[in-house]
Amino acid sequence: MKKILIGLVLLMIMIWCTNGNTMTLLKKLSKNFTKEQSYDKRSESLEERPCDCETRVEWTDLGENVYPRHLRETKCISTHCWFGHSRCNPILYTVKVLTSNPLPFVDPMLPEGLRSDWTFVDKTVSVGCLCSR
């Protein structure tokens, strides 16, 4: 009986921590799911889950000579999650931004008219936070 209860609790936590994929998991587990039943993500509770990391959205100014000048980043506010057993780690993504070209370097990826004035530069930004060990 104890094993069944623990299994059900773990299943509920797993369903709770699947971001928007709850119905996909339930469809696989339930044979009696019908098309008439629907799921609306907007009705999902905004209650914080133990596997969520608290975040803050910031706009980073890269300066006048960069296009796009502003990039949206998501910063991790909380450091721990999952009842203190895991850490909130930033999800990093590399984007290419255009910067004015001070050197005589010609970037072949750019159209002919922009090659002498601009060049691509890689910029790493945080796009979210992931609760992991």
Image (tube, rainbow, N blue to C red):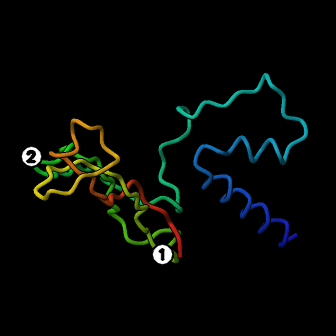
Seen at 28% across and 51% down, the residue is 107
85 to 118, vertically: above or below? below
What x and y, as percent, mark residue 102? 10, 56
Which residue ends up furthest to the top in the rendered image? 36
Would you call the spot at circle 2 few (<14 residues within 10 Å), some (14-19), or many (20 or more)? Answer: few
Q: 132 or 42, which is in the foreground? A: 132
Q: For the residue marked with disc 1, what is the amino acid?
A: Gly
Q: Nearer the viewer, mark 1 or mark 2?
A: 2
Q: Helix or strand or loop: what does disc 1 sit on? A: loop
Q: Is 113 rendered above or below residue 17?
A: above
Q: Residue at x 80, y 41 (%)?
A: 27
Residue at the disc numbered 1: 84
Residue identified by numbered label 2: 64
Image quarter for residue 40?
A: top right
Choose the circle earlier in sequence order: 1 or 2.
2
Residue at point 65% right, 45% down?
21
Q: Position of residue 78 (x, y in %)?
A: 36, 66
Q: Position of residue 110 (x, y in %)?
A: 30, 43
Q: Is residue 9 left or right of residue 125?
A: right
Quick one: 129 or 6, which is closer to the camera? 129
